[in-house]
Each structure stands twice: as structure tokens, then as C-alpha cells.
Image: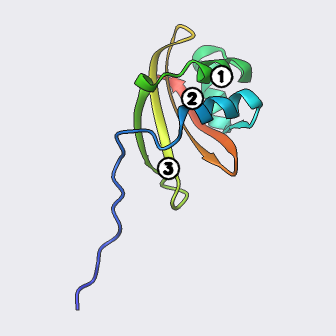
Amino acid sequence: MTTKGPTVHLKRSKPHYSLVEVKQLAKEGAVSFKANARDSARVDFGWRTNEMVAAIQKLKPSHFFKSEPSRMIKNLMIDSYRARDLNTESVYLHFYILKGRLIVNSFKKL
């Protein structure tokens, strides 16, 4: 009898979430920013929630960096973006969609 090791989840080379859906959720206000994301955006850029939402609206497919499984929530994927030109700033952010809401858990200087 052989035993199988843990399931390995590889990084994806394309986004798990539709950027159109991400932008729509942000536009509708169906977005939550984790405390660390809000804090780092404020410290790194001086941005508040409205500037963060505006930056999300400017994301492009070319800003996509990677998609990988969450280490904290089973079966949840997290998409990461790197953009050097969001409101004149270089930004790294990652997020996921859960129960119809966009959850941004990182938003910091690249």
C-alpha cells in the first residue's frame, strides 16, 4: 500500500478572478480592505479608501503577477498584481473574492 503526499497547488500564470468583476465589485462598494492593506496604503502613499478604489479601477491585465492558493483559507485563490503606474505610484496588491465581495489583503509600495 502506498500513501499519497499532500496535494501540491501550483501558482497560476493567469488570474483566477476576472479583472472586470474585480473592478465592478470595487465600483459598487462591495470591497473590504484588511487593516494592514489600509495602513500600508496610508503610510506608503498617503491614500485612503477612495484612492485605493481608484487605483484598482486602473489595473490592467499586464499588471498581473501571480495567482496562488491562500495559506490561510482552504480552496481559496489569491491574485497578485504589480503596477508601476497606479496614480503615479508603484503598487503591489493582492486580493480575492469571497461571498460576492472583493477582499484586498495587501496594498503596498512595490
x and y percentages locating residue 102 in the rendered image? 65, 40
x and y percentages locating residue 89 in the rendered image? 52, 12
Viewer-nearest of discs 1 and 2: 1
**Residue position for label 3:** 77
Determine whether, in the image, residue 7 is placed left or right of residue 93: left
The CA span between labels 1 and 2 is 8 Å
**Residue position for label 2:** 107
Query: Which residue is at a point 72% across and 27% down the rendered structure image?
Result: 27
Query: Which residue is at a point 35% across and 67% down the rendered structure image?
Result: 7
Which quadrant of the figure contains the C terminus?
top left
Give me the disc on residue 108: none
Going by the numbered disc 1, the residue's amino acid type is: Met
Which image quarter: residue 105? Answer: top right
Question: Helix, strand or loop at disc 3?
Answer: strand
Viewer-nearest of discs 2 and 3: 3
- Classed neighbour count for the residue bearing mark 3: other residues with Cα under 10 Å, few (<14), some (14–19), many (≥20): many
The CA span between labels 3 and 1 is 21 Å
The CA span between labels 2 and 3 is 17 Å
Give me the disc on residue 52: 1
User: Contact, CB < 8 Å: mark 1 with mark 2?
Assistant: yes
